[in-house]
Each structure stands twice: as structure tokens, then as C-alpha cells.
Image (cartoon, coloured by chain):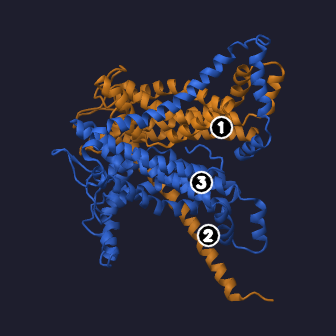
């Protein structure tokens, strides 16, 4: 419905009339009551809008400014260095950056297929009556605060991983060549994989919801033609819907990726906060946001604090890039509010 | 020509397998939701005593509640919304009315999108460096402001979307009657979009009431009930974080009670906002 309105709005350039009216009320002066207030009102709304730009720009400038000491001292080795030692004031961000990327990739690997499965089910198979209810229920996953995911992860998922899943995986996949390296070490329960799994549940509703909006743009005639020639549900999904909405679906996944990269609390609970890179996805690690949440209030000394702020800057830049890609991909879909 | 039965069978099996997988995906997703809510209800309700609302957070081993955290959260969210609502509605109005096609409007829309999806902990860092660092101490003001920055883009976005749903013919009708442009916005645009804008505000409240990350280093925490905006203040999410990560049983129990409270609030708010939206759609 949003789409209809949006397109009809663009198709009929009535805003030309409105623009004239806008200019007209200015020119006519005192014809209508309250016309004098017009410039002031326009100014107020414009100022409020400008505030958003100001906030966004000052986030960039401030983070850059505050992380200058760290950037000056460590240079590029801040990104490539892997030691994080507050005692000797040596900081390298590689473990945190790697942890952020790895957990997010795990989140997408598990979350995206699940989300697409849910979205395709809701779009093609779901009985009409329960469709809205199920969509809303899935979207409620996005409403649950991240700290609740963290707690649930710590008290439910971590014991489950430690007692059942990780020992089983170590037993099955551990002995394999190459791949086995991913599944080594003691089954702590906490760690990179557990964080990735929780993130996958958290990004699922975003990917599913935006994909559904993309699926809604597929022309009905196209789908009906496919069904009419005898295509099965899966064939319609595979040959019609997914190719037609490829950009939208990739955009949805990117949106989920952006969420996963910046997610803080859920990860902080279960990742173990260890500034180290390990081949095994069972090992504890850290992400940029988890490091910030764990260490920032206890960071004494300019260099320590500046390094953490530099971490924040890196995270902001990464999510910024991901969001720009998302915007480009989702350009054609009038994206509703990602809740 | 008869179709090859082998291919038909293959297609049918493939279709069956994939549709089963779709259903499995849905069952897993809903299963996780049920598992989380189930755990919250089972573990949360048991510790949900009147003391939770009446007493402040205890030292380990003593009896207590979450009174200070609940008060703190309400203050923080209320102040944040108080600032975010007028600013958000005005900026959203600019985007939908004056800056609909303008260059500047596009820049603002872009910034709003970035702010909407920016990691909340970054907002916390930002507020830390413009307020906490210069003033030298953590304060409720800083916490409320960081929540405000998170709520703002949500309200801007919904206001703009909802104003877009108001047909242009209504606008033109008002203008044709000699109504000044601002007057048209206030008495036609805002009035028509009112339920939608309310939805946005509810969503913003829901979003910020569960936010933890930006509060960790802006409003910090406070063991006692505080009503001052200038000092550190307790908030429900931060207390839950602290208590859940602690080794003390009674603290963990309080964390579950708090988690239950916060989830019920947030889910109720988002269901309510969806209901309002649903009523609007139905009316259209």
C-alpha cells in the first residue's frame, strides 16, 4: 500500500502546484491570516532537519578527533596489530575487527537462509488468514531488546552449546582435515559461534521483513503466468521471485549485516571478551562493540580511551559503508521503517 | 507429447523438499521466540514480588528490588522522548513537505537513514565525548540525550512516511481555499497523519526503553533512587546487564524479573503501535 501511494505521488507531479502555492503565499503577503508565520515555520522545520545532519557529521568529526592520539601513535599498525595490552599501552584492533566480521558472517550464514525460508513461506505458501499474524510474530523478534537476547544466550544457549552441541561438533567435524581446525578446543559454551548464532536470530526479522517487501513488488501476472504453465511453488520462488527481487534480497541481507556488525549487548554477554584471534569458532573472542561495552568505563589513560574511540570510529565507518550499499540496493523499494 | 515421468517426479520431490524446508525455517524462528518468551515467563514471574517495585537495588545477599532502576528508566525515556518528539516531527515534516524533492532534503534523509541504523553504542560514544568528557562526570542528561538521538530518526522516518500517505489533493484543496502553507501542514497534514505519528512515537519509546549500550557510559548506574538529572542514574537495562553477569543468585533473579518487565513493556508497545497502524490501513 505504501508503494502504491509512493508511486502515485511521483507519477503525478502535483508538487509543482504546491511549489507555486508555497511561493504564492510568500508573495501575496497578508492576504490570508497567519501568512506572516510562513517563513518562520519553514525555518523551524528546516532547522530541525538540519540538526540531523549536524548530529551525523559531528559524530564523524568527534570520533575522528578523539581517536587522533591512537592513530598518531600506532598509525596503520592499529588496524593490523593484534596485541591489546592496556598495561603497556599497546593497542591493535585486529582481533576486535576480525571478531566483528566473523560473528556477523556467521549470523548471515545462518540467519539469511532462515529468513528467506520464512519470507518465501509467508509469501507463497501461507494461508491468507494467518499470514498477517505470522508476519507480525516474526517481526516481534526484532522488538525484543538485545539485552534479553544476551541474557537468554548466557543462561539457555551457552549451557546447551557447552553440554550438547559443541562436544558433538568437536567429535564429528574436529578430526576432518582443514575444516576440523574450526571446531577445536574445549567446549566453553561461550565464544564466537554462540555469538554468531544469537546474532542470526536477531537479524532474521529484519531480513525477512525487507525481503517480504521486495517480494511484494513482483508483478502478479508474472507469478500467475509461471503457475499457469505448471511451475511448482519452489520453481516460482527460484525462477521468478528470487531473480526478480535479487537486489532487494541482497539489500535485505546487507541490512541484516549492518545490524549484526553493530550489535552490542547480546554479543557482550556470550563472546568471552578475549582480544585474540583463534582458528576455532568455539574460542572466546571479542567484537568492537563488545570491547567498548566491557572496557570503556574502566579505560583510564588517554591512549587506552583514544584507542577504544578509534575502535568506535572503525565500527562506524564499516557500518556506514554497509548502509550505503544497502541504500543503493534497496533504492527501488520504498522501505518501511526497519523496526 | 507426454512429459517424462522421471523429470516430473524429480520436480515434485524437489518442490516438496524445499517447501518443507520453508516450514522448518518458520518453525525454528517461531520456536526461538517461544523459547525466549517461555524462559522469561518461567524465570521472571517467580521473582516478581511487590518488593521489585518498592525497594532499591540491593547489595549481594540482601533483599531488594528494582525501584531505582524503574524510576531511572522512566525519567530517561520521558526526557528523551520529550526532546525527540517535537524535533522529530518538525524534521519529518520538512522532509515530507518543504524538502520533498530538494537536494538538502535528500541529504537529510540520508543522514536520518544512517542514524536510524547506526550502532547504538556509537551514539553512546558520541554523547560521551560531547557531554560526559567536558563536564567531567556521568549524568542522567547524557543518558537521556543519547536515547533522544536514537529515538529521533525513528520519529522522523514515521512522520515523513505518514505525511506521504496524505493525498496531495487534500493539500491542494486547502491551499486553494487560501490557507497558508504552514496552516495546511498543521491542520491538514498533521491531523490526517496523527495516528501514524503516534505509532512512530510508540515505536521510538519501545526502541529506547530496552537500549543498554549507550547508557553504559553516559548515565552509568546508581545504587540509590535518584531524581537528579545531573548525576548518574540507574536504569533497568544497565541494572539487568550488571546483575545478570554477576555470580550472585539473588542478583540474577532480580535481573530475570527486570528482563520480564522490560520485555512485556516493549512487546506491548510494539503490538499497540501495530494495532494502530492496522486500524489506519483498515480505514483506508
In which chain is the residue bearing label 1?
B
- Residue that extends furthest to the left in the rendered view of this protein: A88
Q: From the viewer's side, name the closer residue of A267 and A153.
A: A267
Q: For numbered disc 3, what is the local secondary structure?
A: helix
Q: Residue at x 41, y 49 (%)?
A: A149
Q: Nearer the viewer, mark 2 or mark 3?
A: 3
Q: Position of residue A189 (x, y in %)?
A: 30, 60
Left or right, residue A205 beside residue A160: right
Which residue lies at the image location 23% right of the left edge and 39% below the top edge? A303
Q: Quadrant of residue A116?
A: bottom right
Q: Which residue is mark 2?
A: B19
Q: Is residue A147 left or right of residue B170?
A: left
Q: Is residue B175 or residue B17 the one in the foreground? A: B175
Q: Nearer the viewer, mark 2 or mark 1?
A: 1
Q: Say which residue appears at 76% left-offset and 75% top-offset.
A: A230
- Do the dots labelled 2 and 1 sit on one chain? yes
**Residue beneath the point at 70% across and 55% down:** A217
* Residue A197 drawn at (x, y percent): 41, 59
The residues bearing labels 2 and 1 have C-alpha atoms spaced at a distance of 35 Å
Q: Chain of mark 2?
A: B
Check if mark 2 and mark 3 are on a common chain: no
Q: Is residue A55 above or below residue A112?
A: above
Distance from disc 2 to disc 3, alpha carbons, whole Å, reads: 27 Å
Q: Which chain is orange?
A: B
> Helix, strand or loop at disc 2?
helix
Asked if the residue under mark 3 is in contact with the one under mark 2, i.e. CB atoms within 8 Å, the reply is: no
Task: Tell me the residue that label 3 is attached to.
Answer: A329
Which chain is tinted blue?
Answer: A
Quarter of the image with the C terminus of chain A is: top right
Provide residue A59's location: percent of width, then percent of height: 42, 35
Q: Earlier in the sequence, mark 2 or mark 1?
A: 2
Give the number of the disc on residue B161.
1
Amino acid at each position: 500500500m505504501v508503494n502504491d501511494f509512493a508511486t502515485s505521488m511521483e507519477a503525478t507531479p502535483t508538487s509543482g502546484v504546491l511549489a507555486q502555492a508555497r511561493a504564492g503565499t510568500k508573495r501575496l503577503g497578508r492576504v490570508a491570516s497567519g501568512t506572516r508565520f510562513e517563513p518562520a515555520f519553514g525555518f523551524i522545520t528546516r532547522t530541525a532537519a538540519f540538526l540531523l545532519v549536524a548530529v551525523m557529521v559531528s559524530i564523524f568529526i568527534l570520533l575522528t578527533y578523539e581517536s587522533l592520539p591512537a592513530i598518531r601513535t600506532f598509525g596503520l599498525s592499529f588496524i593490523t596489530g593484534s596485541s591489546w595490552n592496556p598495561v603497556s599501552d599497546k593497542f591493535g584492533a585486529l582481533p576486535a575487527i576480525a571478531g566483528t566480521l566473523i560473528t556477523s558472517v556467521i549470523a548471515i550464514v545462518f540467519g539469511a537462509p532462515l529468513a528467506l525460508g520464512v519470507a518465501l513461506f509467508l509469501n507463497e505458501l501461507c494461508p491468507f488468514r494467518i499470514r498477517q499474524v505470522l508476519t507480525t510474530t516474526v517481526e516481534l523478534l526484532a522488538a525484543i531488546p538485545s539485552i534479553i537476547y544476551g541474557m537468554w544466550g548466557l543462561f539457555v544457549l551457552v549451557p546447551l552449546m557447552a553440554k550438547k552441541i559443541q562436544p558433538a561438533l568437536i567429535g564429528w567435524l574436529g578430526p576432518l582435515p582443514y575444516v576440523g581446525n574450526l571446531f577445536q578446543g574445549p567446549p566453553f559454551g561461550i565464544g564466537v559461534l554462540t555469538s554468531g548464532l544469537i546474532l542470526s536470530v536477531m537479524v532474521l526479522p529484519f531480513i525477512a521483513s525487507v525481503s517480504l517487501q521486495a517480494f511484494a513488488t513482483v508483478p502478479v501476472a508474472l507469478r500467475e503466468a509461471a503457475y499457469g504453465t505448471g511451475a511448482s511453488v519452489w520453481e516460482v520462488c527460484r525462477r521468478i521471485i528470487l531473480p526478480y527481487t535479487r537486489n532487494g534480497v541482497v539489500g535485505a541481507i546487507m541490512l541484516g549485516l549492518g545490524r549484526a556488525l553493530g550489535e552490542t549487548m547480546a554479543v557482550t554477554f556470550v563472546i568471552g571478551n578475549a582480544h585474540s584471534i583463534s582458528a576455532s569458532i568455539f574460542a572466546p573472542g571479542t567484537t568492537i562493540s563488545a570491547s567498548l561495552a566491557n572496557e570503556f568505563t574502566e579505560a583510564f589513560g588517554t591512549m587506552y580511551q583514544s584507542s577504544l574511540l578509534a575502535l568506535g570510529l572503525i565500527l562506524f565507518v564499516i557500518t556506514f559503508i554497509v548502509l550505503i550499499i544497502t541504500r543503493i540496493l534497496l533504492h527501488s523499494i520504498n522501505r518501511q521503517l526497519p523496526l | 507429447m507426454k512429459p517424462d515421468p522421471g523429470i516430473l517426479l524429480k520436480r515434485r520431490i524437489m518442490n516438496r523438499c524445499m517447501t518443507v524446508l520453508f516450514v522448518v525455517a518458520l518453525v525454528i524462528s517461531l520456536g526461538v521466540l517461544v523459547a525466549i518468551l517461555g524462559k522469561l515467563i518461567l524465570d521472571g514471574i517467580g521473582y516478581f514480588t511487590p518488593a521489585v517495585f518498592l525497594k532499591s537495588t540491593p547489595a549481594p545477599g540482601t533483599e531488594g528490588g528494582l525501584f531505582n532502576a524503574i524510576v531511572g528508566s522512566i525519567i530517561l525515556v520521558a526526557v528523551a522522548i520529550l526532546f525527540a518528539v517535537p524535533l522529530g516531527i518538525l524534521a519529518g515534516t520538512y522532509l515530507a513537505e518543504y524538502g520533498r524533492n530538494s537536494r538538502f532534503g535528500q541529504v537529510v534523509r540520508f543522514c536520518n537513514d544512517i542514524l536510524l541504523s547506526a550502532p547504538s553504542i556509537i551514539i553512546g560514544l558520541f554523547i560521551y565525548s560531547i557531554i560526559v568528557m567536558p563536564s567531567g562526570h556521568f549524568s542522567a542528561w547524557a543518558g537521556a540525550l543519547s536515547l533522544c538521538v536514537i529515538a529521533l530518526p525513528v520519529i522522523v522516518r514515521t512522520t515523513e512516511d505518514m505525511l506521504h500517505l496524505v493525498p496531495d489533493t487534500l493539500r491542494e484543496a486547502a491551499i486553494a481555499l487560501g490557507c497558508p502553507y504552514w496552516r495546511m501542514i498543521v491542520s491538514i497534514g498533521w491531523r490526517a497523519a496523527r495516528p501514524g505519528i503516534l505509532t512512530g512515537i510508540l515505536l521510538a519509546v519501545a526502541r529506547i526503553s530496552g537500549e543498554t549500550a549507550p547508557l553504559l557510559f553516559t548515565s552509568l548506574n546508581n545504587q540509590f533512587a535518584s531524581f537528579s538529572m545531573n548525576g548518574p542514574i540507574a536504569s533497568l537495562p544497565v541494572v539487568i546487564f550488571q546483575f545478570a553477569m554477576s555470580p550472585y543468585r539473588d542478583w540474577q533473579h532480580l535481573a530475570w524479573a527486570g528482563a520480564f518487565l522490560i520485555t512485556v513493556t516493549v512487546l506491548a508497545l510494539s503490538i499497540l503501535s501495530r494495532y494502530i497502524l492496522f486500524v489506519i490501513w483498515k480505514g483506508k
